[in-house]
């Protein structure tokens, strides 16, 4: 399977039926499982053997989805969760405790920004946000003796800023902390963070992975590359009293992070993905490569049209040659993905008029599915942020985020044309 192309992995990996078994991975809608002996169950609970003990922690259908995502990202293991927000949360809590600190890029999705700035603080975990354009030395000044990770988005939401993997992975390695990257917008088909210096990759699978706006979910993929025994992560190396003194690093080696996330955090918090959502999201992955090619193609054509429109003041799309992220996008991604942003003359009020005039593109609090949709981040997804924090996240008052679908691109362009003419 390692020799398969990304396209073949998207279709075939994760599930290998035996003789007479269903060709399509079935939905195992069961909370519990049958065992041959009491000892078999005891071994499961002691983590001596692999298997499904309860569907709050693992499930055969969800496991298929996890295996496929791990294969696509090139990781050693994956954990499917109830939402992208949960993936962000568990990825941090798995290695941070009260009194710890981490560093994150400021250009994050509004929900992630709020999670890190406000909710993590209530748990005793502090974050320092850094400007992605700051020098490496400036970024390193944000690190403290208790800093446990560096967090960024491969392609930021909504600003579509491309992550400088070379710069930030080098910083993480020098500071000896894991580099966690949210790869939601590019997906593994367009970008592979683990090959670019990241240690852990997370996703909101609600977006392009599912691709059809049917299933909320999240995913953590472990690259298995970070040395958790460097003295900074006692939760990984010291005995876990809830498992009779087991040490995750000693017992599971490179798999320590992803195993701990499942058997400790998901066991206790109960935020695992449902079998139905895993089934639908796995079906979405089967066409990921086809959809991402069309999303990217349509988005570039729409961006080129908007860039020339007299009523459009600016356009941001990383595959536009005029975009400041163009060179990084060419370096790190196969294509630009399907999200672009632009501003119109007249600021926020004009942006809302354009959005209300659209007929094919719908106004939705969502992004990254087959249908074209628009959103005004300043008054919607980033509404809880202060004006200062909005600007740090790349959210301007007039910014319209467009999630370009896979419809006929001429129809998409015509819709934006008629809407802009109403200004």
Image (cartoon, rainbow, N blue to C red):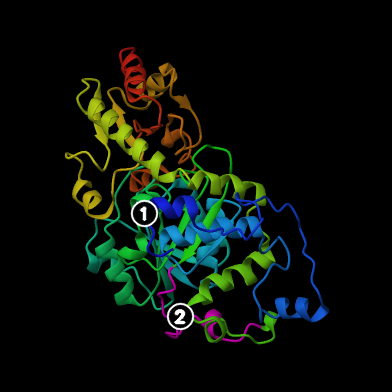
Residue 390 to residue 312: above or below? below
Which numbered disc, 1 or 2, marks the residue closer to the eye?
2
The residue range painted magenta reads: 223-240
Q: Residue furthest toward the front? A: 19
Mark 2 lies on residue: 228
- The number of callouts visible is 2
Give the residue drawn at x 43%, y 47%: 109
Residue 247 position in % (x across, y down): 58, 85
Nearest the eye: 131 or 311: 311
Give the residue drawn at x 54%, y 45%: 283
Q: Is residue 89 left or right of residue 52?
A: left
Quarter placement of the C terminus: top left
Q: Is residue 145 left or right of residue 262?
A: left
- Crowding around mark 2 (Cα neighbors within 10 Å: few <14, some 14 to 19, many 20+) is many
Q: Is residue 319 left or right of residue 58?
A: left
Describe the element under mark 2 as helix, strand or loop: loop
Give the residue drawn at x 54%, y 81%: 252
| Residue 40: image tag | none
Mark 1 lies on residue: 106
Nearest the eye: 123 or 361: 361
Observer able to see residue 272: no
């Amino acid at each position: 399977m390692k020799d398969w192309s990304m396209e073949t992995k998207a279709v075939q990996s994760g599930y290998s039926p035996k003789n007479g078994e269903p060709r399509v991975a079935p939905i195992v809608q069961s909370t519990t499982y049958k065992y041959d002996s009491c000892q078999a169950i005891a071994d499961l609970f002691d983590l001596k053997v692999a298997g499904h003990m309860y569907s709050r922690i693992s499930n055969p259908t969800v496991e298929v989805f996890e295996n496929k995502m791990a294969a696509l990202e090139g990781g050693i293991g994956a954990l499917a969760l109830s939402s992208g927000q949960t993936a962000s949360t568990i990825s941090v809590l798995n290695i941070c405790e009260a009194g710890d600190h981490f560093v994150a890029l400021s250009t994050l999705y509004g929900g992630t920004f709020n999670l890190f700035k406000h909710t993590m603080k209530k748990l005793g975990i502090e974050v320092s946000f850094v400007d992605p354009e700051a020098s490496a030395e400036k970024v390193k000044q944000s690190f403290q003796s208790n800093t446990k990770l560096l967090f960024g988005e491969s392609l930021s939401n909504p600003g579509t800023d491309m992550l400088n993997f070379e710069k930030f992975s080098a910083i993480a390695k020098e500071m000896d902390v894991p580099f966690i990257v949210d790869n939601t917008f590019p997906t593994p088909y367009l970008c592979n963070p683990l090959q670019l210096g990241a240690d852990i990759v997370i996703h909101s699978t609600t977006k392009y992975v599912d691709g059809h706006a049917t299933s909320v979910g999240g995913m953590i993929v472990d690259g298995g590359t970070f040395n958790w025994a460097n003295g900074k992560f006692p939760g990984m190396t010291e005995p876990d009293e809830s498992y009779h003194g087991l040490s995750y690093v000693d017992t599971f080696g490179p798999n320590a992070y992803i195993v701990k996330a499942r058997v400790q955090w998901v066991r206790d918090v109960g935020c695992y993905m449902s079998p139905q959502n895993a089934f639908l999201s796995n079906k979405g992955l089967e066409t990921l490569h086809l959809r991402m090619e069309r999303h990217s193609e349509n988005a570039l054509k729409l961006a080129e049209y908007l860039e020339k429109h007299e009523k459009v003041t600016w356009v941001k799309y990383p595959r536009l040659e005029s975009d400041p992220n163009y060179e990084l996008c060419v370096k790190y991604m196969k294509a630009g993905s399907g999200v672009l942003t632009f501003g119109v003359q007249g600021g926020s009020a004009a942006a809302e008029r354009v959005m209300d005039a659209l007929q094919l593109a719908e106004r939705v609090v969502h992004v990254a599915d087959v249908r074209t949709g628009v959103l005004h981040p300043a008054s919607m997804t980033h509404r809880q942020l202060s004006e200062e924090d909005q600007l740090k996240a790349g959210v301007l008052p007039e910014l319209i985020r467009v999630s370009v679908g896979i419809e006929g691109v001429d129809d998409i362009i015509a819709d934006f044309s008629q809407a802009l003419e109403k200004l």
